[in-house]
Amino acid sequence: MDHFELRDGALHCEDVPLADVAAAVGTPVYVYSAAAMVRQVAALRVALAAVGDPLIAYAVKANPNAAVVATLARQGLGADVVSGGEYRRAVAAGIPAGRIVFSGVGKTEEEMALALGGGLFQFNVESVAEAEMLSAVASRMGKTAPVGFRINPDVLSGTHAKISTGAAENKFGIPLGEAAAAYARAAALPGLRVQGVAVHIGSQLTSLAPLEEAFTRLGGLIGELRAAGHAIEVADLGGGLGVPYDPSLPPPPTPEAYGAMVKRIAGGWGARLVFEPGRLIVANAGVLVTRLIRIKPGAAHPFLVVDAAMNDLMRPALYEAWHAIEAVRPRGSRMVANVVGPVCETGDTFATAREMDSVEPGDLLVFRTAGAYAAAMSSTYNSRPLTPEVLVSGGRWAVVRPRLDVEALIAADRVPDWL
Ligand code: LLP
């Protein structure tokens, strides 16, 4: 069931008319369905039930809003974090420290100390230099850091180049061929307890084949590492499973198909499995509601100038991403148009020659599948207020991030007295 549905001709999020939210909060505004997130967690749990007791560590970067993370904490999820800020957000939202995985190529000493002080499940370490720094920080604190190395399996993930992470030329992880030496070095470091391996090859993957190849390579490495005397108890298989954006395209593999593949490849490893899903949990639990400001004639198609822009939803400008666009109250007719925002760049284009609901100035529209990497990546470019966020649960809704207005933006700057 989709939690964004037309009822009496008007788009609702669960039991709340989106027009009511827009009237109260203004536009643009992100609206999230708690039920949709909970449903995704339940589906993933069922899909992974056959692989023992996996740790599902939600990738906080996908949507770090405190209310979203708290919703997922109540479902028993852990967190995958990539900064001190995300670590603090996860803990503040109620994720137990023992369920936090710390990923990322650029962890600083301060971030390492923060997580060591508060506790965590595992650091996914991406280089020998990082392992050495972590050991030094842990030793200074009288602690032992639980670690796994992130392995770069050198597979082509087939996703957009900017979100592909598992090829040899990418900055992520340790090459398979250097893993044995890295583990030997880490085992000799006093501040580390080497317990795992990790892999993450990219995001919005629409085929299981590259994941299967990466996991197979990881399985081979686990055997080699154990033969060399390392106790590998944890295998973190990352995130990356894609979600449907365009209903006219074949859907990505289901969580069930993913779970069956994982069981086939990793079921016999005798390791606790960790997963780091982000998009899968929240992408289709969110929409961006926007209002049509005006229609401007164009050479081939009219420009629909909406009040959301690339600063609110960067994915089309950054990755040529496709988001479904629908009227909140469809008029029953269709049109072909270019959908653009007010920002002064041609990149501020959400859709070109899109066949869509007919709309008129003042009408509300939604960008679908805007729960992941959307508000999280927004900015105030062009001095536009930061978009507010709303969480819906049944018939209730609440503003979970108010609009950060322009006065607050201006007040945050300082003009030196020598000017
Ligand atoms: N684990 C690690 C180490 C990651 O780097 C990521 C995402 C995830 C897990 C979660 O991946 P997911 O399950 O959400 O695919 N801004 C881009 C996506 C960037 C993904 C970065 N890493 C977008 O809007 O498509």
Image: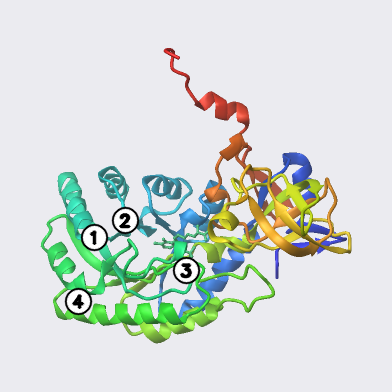
Residue beneath disc 3:
240
Is disc 3 surrounded by few (<14), some (14 to 19) or many (20+) residues within 10 Å?
A: many
Say what amino acid the circle numbered 3 marks.
Answer: Gly
Give the CA distance from mark 4 to mark 3.
25 Å
Q: Nearer the viewer, mark 2 or mark 4?
A: 2
- Element carrying mark 2: loop
- Element carrying mark 3: loop
Q: Earlier in the sequence, mark 3 or mark 1?
A: 1
Q: Are marks 1 and 2 in contact (CB under 8 Å)?
A: yes
Image coords of residue 57 (percent x, y): 43, 62
Ligand 1 within 8 Å of disc 3? The answer is yes
Image coords of residue 226 (percent x, y): 19, 78
Residue beneath disc 4:
225
Quadrant where the C terminus lies? top left
Give the CA distance from mark 1 to mark 2.
8 Å
Q: Earlier in the sequence, mark 1 or mark 2?
A: 2
Q: Is 62 displayed left or right of 39 in the figure?
A: left
Residue beneath disc 2:
105
- Element carrying mark 4: helix
Quadrant where the N terminus lies? bottom right
Say what amino acid the circle numbered 2 marks.
Answer: Val
Q: Nearer the viewer, residue 139 or 257?
A: 257
The label shown at residue 127 is 1
Q: Are marks 3 and 2 in contact (CB under 8 Å)?
A: no
Is disc 4 surrounded by few (<14), some (14 to 19) or many (20+) residues within 10 Å?
A: some
